[in-house]
Amino acid sequence: MLTTPSFEYLLLSPMLIILAAAVIGVLAEAFLDRNHLPVIQLFISVGAILLALIQIYRIKSSSSTSAAIGSVVIDKATIYLQGTILIIGLLALLLISDQEQFVAQASAIPGSREEQESTSKGSIQTEIYPLLSFALAGMMLFTCASDLITLFVALEVFSLPLYLLAGLSRRRRLLSQEAALKYFLLGAYSSAFFLFGAAFLYGISGSVYLVDISSAVSGGYGNDVFVLIGLIFISVGLLFKISAVPFHAWTPDVYQGAPTSVTAFMAAATKVAAFGAILRIFYVVFSPIANQWRPIISVIAIITMVFGSAVAIAQRDVKRMLAYSSIAHAGFILTAVLALNKSGLSAALFYLTTYGLSTLAAFGIITLIRDATGEVTDLNKWAGLGKKSPLIAGSFAFLLLSFAGIPLTSGFIGKFAIFSAAYETGNIAVVVFGVLSSALAAFFYIRVILLMFVAQSQNDSISIAIPSVKSRIAIGATTAATVILGLFPSLLLNITQSFSIFIK
Amino acid sequence: MNTSNNLLYLILIPLLSSAILLLLGRKIDRYGHLIGTLASACSFVIAVVEFFAMKSRDVTQRAVTQKLFEWISVGDFKVDATLLLDQLSICFVLLITGVGTLIHIYSIAYMSHDRDRRRFFAYLNLFIAAMLLLVLGDSYLNLYVGWEGVGLASYLLIGFWNQKPEYATAAKKAFVANRIGDFGLSIAVMLMFANFGTVTFSGVANHAESASRSALTAIGLMLLLAACGKSAQFPLQSWLGDAMAGPTPVSALIHAATMVTAGVYLIARSNFIFDVAPTAQMMVMIIGAITLLFGAIVGMAKDDIKKALAASTMSQIGYMILATGLGPVGYAFAIMHLLTHGFFKAGMFLGAGSVMHGMHDEVNMRKYGGIGKFMPLTFVTFGLGYLAIIGVPPFAGFYSKDKIIETALNHEGSAGLIFGSLALIGAAITAFYMSRVMLMTFFGNERWTNRADEPHEAPFLMAAPMVVLALGSICTGFLFTRGESLVNWLRPVVNPAGEQHLVEHYSATSISIAAITAVLIGVAFAAIKYLKQVPNIAPDNVSVFTKFARKDLLQDEFNNAVLVKPGQSLVKTLLNFDYIVIDGLVRLVGALSLDAGQTLRKLQTGYVRSYALLMILGVTALIFTIWLVTL
């Protein structure tokens, strides 16, 4: 006898709205006049995100394990993460909608006449919007999936659009396409690990539901070597997404090759979504056998922090530097995963939000620094930027200070919260390495600040684009958030504390 | 405790006005001073309203608070930004806003030729806001914010004419000397937090009874250090004389009536600490006594009218500090002297400003003489202030100073007799040097060189505040002592136990007679020396004693030898250490990391196949580790 599956549509509505917007966007591509598409697509995407945010607000105190016949769990942490992803998505959308960085026609061969024609015609690849919406929906689902199949589907739903988006840069197209292909190949490779791990866990527990795997883990299978292998393989898939060492190698290439506004979105939102899933899996499923996996994750966290900080020093390209910085930050947030307590979760949520917003702002600013050939990411050419535009250079310097975790920035509060949560649970070694690599990281952040303000400008070809209103809103809001959350962290800390609840 | 919603506006109005004056800049040069004056007057009106509201309430219900926001919340450490207006702070609020407003009005005329008058008013407003925050904070941390704020305003105003390098240096000197005191206050706050876990006045008061003696002494001494810095007490007094570089209204408001008395406020406010820390309390008395004599002696030798008045301020604050050291009975009299001093000293500074205004900014009294008949109003108002400060009955200073001498003499033990006698000697010297100022300025032969234009009387806007302050110099002492009104008013805050002297060693009348005698002796000496011809260049053939006094009893030389020189060589050594060892280490780490980065960077070949290989190696390593862990 079959029972009708029950869905709690209200709880699913934020995701459904974004998915619907993506589908409508695709239809619009097919049927509407190309000249109006940019406005229509932007309108659909922004409207959907705003609508979804309203729904998030409406369900902010709900929780349910049966929203979609057990495949999705809506709890406080999910709602917080989804809200964060939506806000990041909204701000990233404002940056992305400045189409200038995107290729006019993606299918044209780089350097061909066809490309030149479509560029001079001013064509625009408006598929970006539905792709972004699909990615957003996938990320949201990723944070709340409670079975391995849904988790995998969500992973692919948000990854595939990102692979495509990475290849759409208008300038240096070969580099961009190479980045996209690398991202795709390695992403597929890591997905295979993930699936392999899922198979192991299914083999042990006979179920793909996290709740069943969790009871299998705590019910005597905990020491089974297959559980541990499954855990490692699943982790590889997830650690790849957050770019933890040694699964990070794609990050610098992709961050550099992708259009900068897409990089901003990837860096900020993917981290939130992937960490959402990691936190859920480790907090909900594998916490009973923490002693088995803590050493591994500790080592990965330490290597990630130290490696990211050390290699960032040697970078000459600002986007690559931020890529390594994002690797180091992944290590910092992993520290919170080790804490396995409420303050660790709360700290991670806080860190993800503030890091996401600061990252958006930083990449947003990079889009403004240009010369005749487009964006200038060579750090040597940034010399003397402080004289040219004190406001832009000052904001960028402030964001770098936040990444470095200097007090009075949100970055400091985030690091402080994470390290103190980890310290409480006795992971002193990790905290020591974390603080040391923060110091190391400060070295290259401050080097950039010195470069901008102290060094003499080498050439005058560099100029600062006047940001559009949309970019201005995005950069301004995210920079302001970095300042405000540094001065009044309790505004957000109170929220993350009350939202740091996972349910099974 | 009652709450009020108006306290914030006391501070906010001048603060906003200051911001407006600074941000709008030259655009509002024409009427900026009016905005500033109006802001100060608004605060004064609120203060008066709050005062009468407070007066109408029952004695136990008088204090009001207003919580602004939760300021710091770290673990167990919670500090709210809360304002507290009680019987003690209202005295200060009225003084600050009242005298402050008068001085704003005075400055409109005094600064009318200065092209930066708007900026001047912005700083004055900033000062008023910061000083109000200082006296309205309900915790030491809130007080500290105001404390630093007034330091900043003082620095800005001393150096207002910073186009003259020596004025800028004077500002810097004041700032540095104050920093030493501020350091004491910050350590005191830390000690309170470490020992009591709270920094609010009420919280510290509750814990003080049961705290260890040594902790209380340490806190008391640190608070005293803070008071010494802000109130120009020995050994941090050297900045006040130089601070006279600021425009005269600033000297009147900040360096006579209000800011320099913040130290007295701090000690009176911390009565619950000093009352149970006798060692610290004894130090307070000693510092007060030393400074009151020190200032008086320096005052005898100064030819610069403002520096003479500054020395006198130092000395009078010495009296107040001495009174606060006398325990529960003394606090109220310290505050009383503070208030009367606020009137007569501010009045005299304004008078001095008026003389300078009429004499082309000449400050050397040897170039004055016989000004009385040219500036009758200044002469009369300054004269009333003079009678008040030397303590002639029935003027204000007589009541307040007499009370301090009386309380000191009746203090238990031999300390009482010693400090009381010193205070009496100080009163005689005060009478001498103030008579000297009076005689050299307003009487005697006319010694100014530029005969072409005679001194002229001050304009109305300058004269009016002088008259009001002179009225205050006449009647405040009488008002405060009538029916012990001020003592009773302040009792719930500074003397809740209602302590009194057990034994009256000397009767009030005999002490008054002794004090008046001392004053008469001082005046007589001055009259003998200065009613005759005064040379218009300071004579060289003077006693060693006078030479020392002229050089401020060698305080700068002392500071130089004991603090500055050793400090500089210490700094040089540290700098070298920093450069070679610390920086060397940092450079080494930097170079090593750079090398490491360059090496590790080679992992990033750009080939997907090597990335995938890296991942496989990673997974293998992980599995190997887990195998080790589960082994």
Image (cartoon, helix red, strand yellow):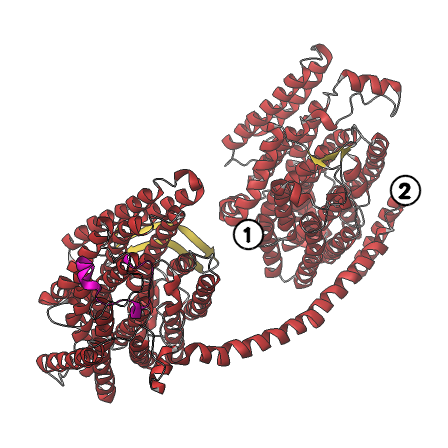
Q: Nearer the viewer, mark 1 or mark 2?
A: 1
The residue at which mark 2 appears reads as B607
Mark 1 — on which chain does it sit?
Answer: A
Residue at the limit of the structure toward the front, as seen here: B452
Identified at 88% across, 23% down, the residue is A109
The residue at which mark 1 appears reads as A408
Expressed as whole percent of the image width and height from the top left, the position of residue A260 reads 73, 35
**Is B281 part of what is drawn in magenta?**
no
Mark 2 — on which chain does it sit?
Answer: B
Which is nearer the eye, B460 or A490? B460
Quadrant where the C terminus of chain A is found in the figure? top right
Residue A272 is at least partly visible in this image: no
Expressed as whole percent of the image width and height from the top left, the position of residue B284 reads 32, 77
Per the rendered image, the range of residues in magenta is B358-379
Expressed as whole percent of the image width and height from the top left, the position of residue A422 reads 62, 57
Please tell me how crowded label 2 is: few (under 14), some (14-19), or many (20+) other residues with Cα within 10 Å.
few
Q: CA distance from mark 1 to mark 2?
A: 41 Å
Identified at 46% across, 61% down, the residue is B168
Residue A160 lies in quadrant: top right
Circles 1 and 2 in contact, beta carbons < 8 Å: no
Identified at 73% across, 32% down, the residue is A153
The answer to whether dots 1 and 2 both sit on one chain is no
Quadrant where the N terminus of chain A is found in the figure? top right
The secondary structure type at the circle numbered 2 is loop
